[in-house]
């Protein structure tokens, strides 16, 4: 039979084996997405790619500022947010803002794909404007920054753990807002837009190179959105279970089990941030081509630099 110490060890092991490598891979992937998407002109002018680029930028902020703190808590038992009230509020606020902002952009991207396959030319032209897309990106970030301001005033250290304080906002956030934002709304948007795309594709309006990029974007989005829809359900509803069982007397073993499964859910949800770039590389021939050319370019420059330094020594 499993004991408390064994479960706690398995929780730490999850961080050593999965979370830390995922953090490194995710940060590298975010940087490479930004480099590749900003380098090619056709990518910069593609509205869906612009949404995905915005998601990569927010992910590049989320992973080192938020996820690394979760690793320190669960893997090493080190946490400033559980000892300092201001750090607790700052961490919780940034966690919600960056998490939701990052996952919202793939949803905007699939909506964009739905729009550009529309048979209505007026709708396509109105929503496919790069200027409008950039306005949506900025407005989207500002919206989440403002909507989560109450988090700052409703979090604190309770029994040595950074958590939400009991109250109406916490109840609303736990039972309504979080399940909607993380689970129900993304699943609805993905389902609605995907079925709409399939319906619209009976009359395809994209041609030439635009069609090629559009097909690649769609192929890149499919597995990413599937992971988002599946992982969002346990992540979004986890808080309801914790709140319903908050008044129960829990022994150390049950607390250890809850921490373990909480870490499993957290790692699974962070697949959305970590493996995005690698999905793009696998699904897009164009991205693989750019990545390969950049690798060979860097290798040649490195070889030239090494040769020059050797000549100078001679």
Image (cartoon, rainbow, N blue to C red):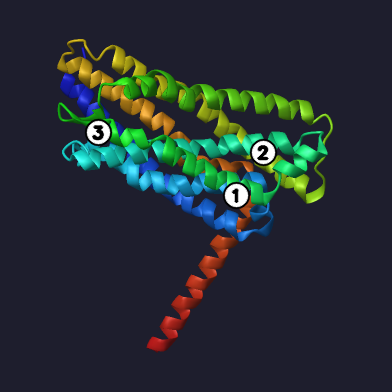
Q: Position of residue 177 (x, y in %)?
A: 43, 24
The reply to whether callout 2 and callout 1 are in contact (CB within 8 Å) is no
**Is residue 33 shown above or below 257?**
below
Residue identified by numbered label 2: 112
**Distance from the alpha carbon under mark 3 to that under mark 1:** 37 Å
Which x, y percent locates residue 237?
A: 40, 19
Label 2 vs label 1: CA separation?
13 Å
Q: CA distance from mark 2 to mark 3?
A: 38 Å
Residue 266 in the image, given as x and y percentages of width and height: 37, 30
Q: In which quadrant of the rendered image does the C terminus lie?
A: bottom left
Q: Residues within 10 Å of mark 1 (few under 14, many from 20)?
A: some
Quick check: can you spot residue 110? yes
Nearer to the camera, 117 or 168: 168
Query: In the picture shown, does residue 266 fall above or below 80?
Result: above
For this rendering, which residue is in front, 57 or 39?
57
**Which residue appears at 56% of the width and 67% of the height?**
297
Q: Which residue is label 3 attached to? A: 74
The residue depicted at 42 percent of the width and 29 percent of the height is 268
Closest to the observer, 295 or 188: 188
Task: Indicate the secondary structure of the residue bearing disc 2.
Answer: helix
Residue 12 location, quadrant: top left
Q: Which residue is mark 1?
A: 134
Counting residues from the start of the chain, the first of labels 2 and 1 encountered is: 2
- Callout 3: SS: helix
Residue 92 placement, left or right of 185: left
Q: Residue at x 34, y 19 (%)?
A: 171
Residue 246 placement (x, y as % from top left): 24, 15
> Which is more toward the observer, 9 or 203?
203
Observer able to see residue 281 = no
């Amino acid at each position: 039979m499993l004991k408390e110490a064994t479960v706690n060890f398995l929780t730490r092991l999850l961080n050593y084996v999965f979370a830390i490598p995922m953090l490194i891979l995710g940060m590298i992937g975010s940087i490479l997405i930004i480099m590749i998407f900003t380098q090619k002109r056709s990518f910069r002018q593609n509205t869906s790619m612009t949404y995905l680029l915005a998601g990569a930028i927010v992910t590049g902020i989320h992973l080192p500022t938020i996820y690394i703190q979760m690793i320190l808590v669960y893997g090493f038992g080190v946490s400033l947010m559980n000892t300092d009230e201001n750090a607790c509020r700052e961490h919780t606020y940034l966690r919600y803002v960056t998490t939701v902002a990052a996952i919202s952009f793939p949803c905007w991207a699939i909506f964009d794909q739905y729009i550009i396959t529309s048979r209505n030319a007026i709708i396509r032209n109105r929503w496919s404007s790069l200027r409008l897309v950039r306005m949506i990106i900025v407005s989207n970030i500002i919206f989440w920054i403002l909507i989560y301001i109450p988090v700052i005033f409703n979090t604190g250290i309770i029994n040595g753990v950074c958590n939400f304080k009991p109250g109406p906002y916490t109840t609303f956030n736990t039972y309504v807002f979080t399940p909607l934002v993380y689970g129900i709304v993304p699943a609805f948007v993905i389902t609605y837009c995907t079925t709409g795309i399939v319906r619209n594709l009976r009359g395809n309006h994209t041609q030439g190179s635009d069609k090629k990029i559009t097909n690649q974007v769609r192929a890149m989005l499919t597995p990413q959105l599937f992971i988002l829809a599946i992982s969002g359900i346990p992540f979004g509803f986890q808080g309801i279970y914790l709140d319903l069982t908050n008044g129960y007397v829990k022994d150390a073993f049950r607390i250890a089990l809850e921490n373990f499964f909480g870490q499993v859910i957290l790692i699974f949800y962070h697949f959305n941030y970590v493996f995005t770039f690698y999905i793009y590389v696998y699904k897009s021939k164009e991205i693989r081509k750019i990545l390969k050319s950049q690798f060979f370019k860097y290798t040649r420059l490195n070889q030239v630099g090494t040769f020059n330094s050797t000549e100078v020594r001679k």
